Image: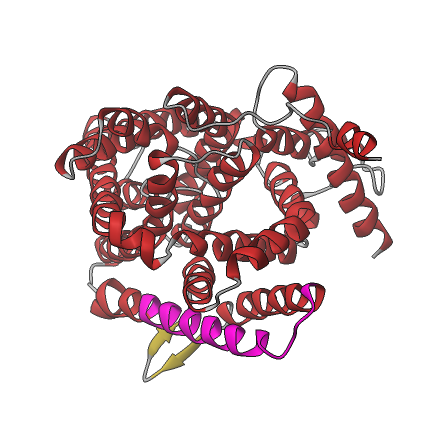
Amino acid sequence: METYLICLAVGLVGGLMMSRLTKLVNLPAVTAYLVAGLLLGPFCLGALRIPGLGFNSLEQVAGMSIITQAALGFIAFTIGNEFRLSQLKATGAKAITIGILQAVITTLLVDVVLVVLHFCFPSVLSIPCAITLGAIASATAPAATLMVVRQYKADGPLTRLLMLVVAIDDAVGLVLFSVSFGIATALSNGHVSVLAVVVEPIIEIILSLGLGSAMGWLLNWVEQFFHSRSKRMSISVAFVLLTVGLSMLEFEVAGIHCGFSLLLVCMMTGTIFCNVCPTSEELMSRVDGWVMPLNVLFFVLSGAELDLNVLAQPVTLLVGIIYILARSAGKYSGAALSCKLTGQPKPITDHLGITLLPQAGVALGMALTATTLPDGALARNVVLFAVLVYELVGPNLTKRSLLAVGEIKPEGRTSARKHNEAKA
């Protein structure tokens, strides 16, 4: 236990110190946390096997998954704040259209490119693996996007649309992956499972939205019994942790596997709570301050769990580079086309796709499921390589796009220490 606590402390301090270095070259703090995780991970300092100095193995990092899951829950809960009825009335329908179209176009483009690669080099990549990677390509990481928006206090039409699209993307990606993986499994095994392809994905989404709605209403009801800010913040934190725990439950009903999407459940909880609680804005800001260290640890651990062994595999690098290029083209063209169809202004049309490039936790979860395919290990390694690239490059590209449209207020113009001294 003491080793885990020391590792977490070293990771938190290391991530924060690295953010001071990356600030000198104008890189987002989230990139600093990821780099700190890589340096403290089992392929750098962790390889020295000194207890407490970094993370000594991937198994040790995996053992801290409770922190990453909790952080994802709070991130999704916060994103739910973007789904206020006043905002949905203005951009909701357009955001849903863009969210669905860009994900579908990305999947189709990556599918076509990788299937062509299969026909050119059949021994490198199978068709089941190709279409599974196509579905995984639709997923976008909400955590990195949210951290960039928070750090630079970004606000404007693109930022608000981006947060809605990123949230919708999770539900769309879940459906696309379930259908594609079901088809891939059928091609591998020779039989199609209607339950796996159609029924179970729909049930997962319905259950997730239902549980999230119930938790949002329940949180609002319980909040009314407390009046002090600290206690109301504490009950909000407790409910998010409870929601994360409940979303991990799995069960079977009449032979149908039932489960929940952590991101969807927590996003729905935040959405309901923000629309029914009159003081939700103030509570959200207080919860955000409480979970900041948790978010830093989330990205440090994300960097530490990146397996650098994939860089020594030529086939993985080849397929990975093609996957990255095809996915990037799909996200950019899909977002641009859907923005034009919904009448978005040119700055949003030109930059939304770039802000959708980050990819991490959701994609890694899908890749883990894909390992059950005959060549599923290749799919997992390709996604690991892509996540390594996207997480290190994506946040900076998101920052540049938001800066280009004038929606960023750069961090660091004031010092909290100097501000407090001036007040004294």
Would you identify the image quadrant in which residue 15 lies?
top right
Query: Which percent across, then down, holds residue 343?
Result: 16, 35
Query: Which percent across, then down, holds residue 176?
Result: 26, 52
User: Which quarter of the image is occupied by the C terminus?
Assistant: top right
Colour mapping = secondary structure
Query: Which percent across, then down, holds residue 275?
Result: 41, 64
**Residue 259 at least partly seen:** no
The verdict on residue 205 being magenta is yes
Q: Is residue 40 left or right of residue 205?
A: right
The verdict on residue 401 being magenta is no
Q: Nearer the viewer, residue 374 or 347?
A: 347
For image coordinates 27% across by 26% down, the residue present is 329
Q: Nearer the viewer, residue 103 or 200?
A: 103
Q: Is residue 127 left or right of residue 406?
A: left
User: Which quarter of the image is occupied by the N terminus?
Assistant: bottom right
Q: Is residue 133 left or right of residue 97?
A: right
> From the viewer's perspective, is residue 403 above or below residue 98?
above
**Residue 113 at least partly seen:** yes
For image coordinates 23% across by 43% down, the residue present is 98
Query: Which percent across, then down, holds residue 307?
Result: 57, 36
> From the viewer's perspective, is residue 367 above or below residue 327?
below
Dominant SS type (magenta)? helix
> From the viewer's perspective, is residue 162 above or below residue 44?
below
Which residue occupies the extreme bottom position in the image? Answer: 254
Would you identify the image quadrant in which residue 235 lies?
bottom right
Part of the protein shown in magenta = 204-229
Which residue occupies the extreme front position in the image? Answer: 423
